[in-house]
């Protein structure tokens, strides 16, 4: 007579860990994740919408990425790992006869974290290549100044809520007519 081995359901062993945002967002709960051990939760990333975190309707097009850094009991605390603007935001603005200029910058922040910043400029009309180059150069210069002078968390906060877009717009609009400037993504890179 053969004995049948009992199968153990792995889901029954798992516990649900609550994930909390950093102090910048009042340590609000942003989700839950299942895991057997607290070590398995470390390093996981969670995406949350800025509108859900702050209640600001105008920021519904921005998602924040949080990375779990610490687990206390069944509570996991996070830090900001990046931000992304939904691509459909610019699709509504860019038209056939507009120039769209993309800029990517890798830079170190004030707290020595390596960050990748992606920005997009949409012009009022089609512009010459020489002006595109001048805009790209000016934007890279302004973004690198901004990145070096701020901590990573402050950089993301300023990209979403601050006056950085207004200062970028003011510095670039002297070259050509600008419709919109958007910081599309800020992401922390591993060294």
Image (cartoon, helix red, strand yellow):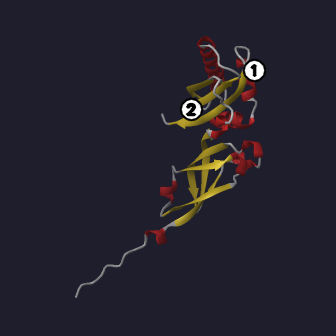
Question: For the residue labelled by badge 1, is the local secondary structure a helix, a strand or a loop?
Answer: helix
Give the vertical position of 162 relative to 52 (above or below): above
Question: Could you say which disc has been placed on residue 13 in the image?
Answer: none
Q: Can residue 28 be seen here?
A: yes
Give the vertical position of 1 relative to 69 (above or below): below
Q: Position of residue 173 (x, y in %)?
A: 73, 18
Side (left or right) of 148 relative to 2:
right
Q: Nearer the viewer, residue 133 or 139?
A: 133
Q: Position of residue 45 (x, y in %)?
A: 55, 49
Q: Position of residue 61 (x, y in %)?
A: 68, 42
Q: Residues within 10 Å of mark 1 (few under 14, many from 20)?
A: few
Q: Nearer the viewer, residue 22 or 83?
A: 83
Q: Nearer the viewer, residue 135 or 141?
A: 135
Pointer 1: what residue? 170
Q: CA distance from mark 1 to mark 2?
A: 24 Å
Pointer 1 with pointer 2, Cβ within 8 A: no
Single out the residue that lies furthest toward the front.
96
Give the vertical position of 107 relative to 70 (above or below): above
Pointer 2: what residue? 115
Instruction: Please report the residue visible at 74 percent of the width from the left and 37 percent of the height from the top.
Output: 161
Instruction: Please report the residue visible at 60 percent of the width from the left and 45 percent of the height from the top.
Output: 65
Name the front one of labels 1 and 2: 1
């Amino acid at each position: 007579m053969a004995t049948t081995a009992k199968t153990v359901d792995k889901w029954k062993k798992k516990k649900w860990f609550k994930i909390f945002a950093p102090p910048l967002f009042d340590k609000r709960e942003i989700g839950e994740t299942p895991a057997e051990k607290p070590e398995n939760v470390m390093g996981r990333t969670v995406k949350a919408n800025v509108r859900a975190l702050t209640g600001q309707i105008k920021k519904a097009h921005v998602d924040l990425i949080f990375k779990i850094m610490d687990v206390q009991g069944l509570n996991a605390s996070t830090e900001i790992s990046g931000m992304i603007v939904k691509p459909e935001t610019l699709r509504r603005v860019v038209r056939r006869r507009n120039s769209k200029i993309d800029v990517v910058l890798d830079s170190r922040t004030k707290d020595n974290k390596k960050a990748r910043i992606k920005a997009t400029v949409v012009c009022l009309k089609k512009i010459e290549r020489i002006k595109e180059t001048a805009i790209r150069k000016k934007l890279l210069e302004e973004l690198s100044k901004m990145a070096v002078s701020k901590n990573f968390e402050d950089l993301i906060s300023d990209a979403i809520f601050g006056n950085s877009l207004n200062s970028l717009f003011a510095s670039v609009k002297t070259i050509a007519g600008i419709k919109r400037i958007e910081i599309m993504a800020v992401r922390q890179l591993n060294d």
